[in-house]
Amino acid sequence: MGRQTSSSKTEAGGEQHRKEEKHHKHMEQLAQLGAVAAGAYALHEKHKAKKDLENARSHRIKEEIAATVAVGSAGFAFHEHHKKKDAKKNGHHH
């Protein structure tokens, strides 16, 4: 009664791969959203640096930090995209 057949083990493994694929997809989407938001903030600070000459240095620093965050977030999205592909590939083999 408590024993699993090999087909039910395969189904459980396939379900695990689908959950992993879904997790990586969500993480990829969040990272993409973070990259877009950070990029938009960097552009906002660049604009402020041009308009507010007294505090331009502060705005340029914030712009650079936001741009760095955007690049890091895009890199994480790329990483998660490949993790998602691996999970999908591994799920189809079982």
Image: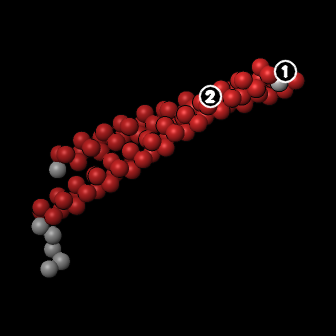
Query: Residue 53: which disc?
Result: 1
Give the image quarter of residue 82.
top left
Which residue extends farthest right?
A: 54
Give the image quarter of residue 68.
top right
| Residue at x-position 66% and y-position 29% | 42
Frontmost of labels 2 and 1 is 1
Residue type pointed to by label 2: Ala
Which residue extends farthest bottom?
A: 1
Q: Are marks 2 and 1 in contact (CB under 8 Å)?
A: no
| Residue at x-position 17% and y-position 50% | 94
Answer with left or right where residue 74 lies relative to residue 48.
left
Answer with left or right where residue 40 lies relative to residue 19.
right
Answer with left or right where residue 32 lies relative to residue 54.
left
Say few, some or many: other residues with alpha carbon within 10 Å of mark 1 (under 14 / 14 to 19 / 20 or more). Answer: few
| Residue at x-position 59% and y-position 30% | 39
| Residue at x-position 17% and y-position 58% | 10
| Element class at badge 2 | helix
| Element class at badge 1 | helix
Query: Residue 81: which disc?
Result: none
Please tell me whether residue 40 is drawn above or below residue 21 in the rendered image: above
Residue 75, image x and y in percent?
48, 32
Residue identified by numbered label 2: 67
Looking at marks 2 and 1 on the same chain, the residue that comes earlier in the sequence is marked by 1
Please tell me whether residue 71 is drawn above or below residue 92 in the rendered image: above
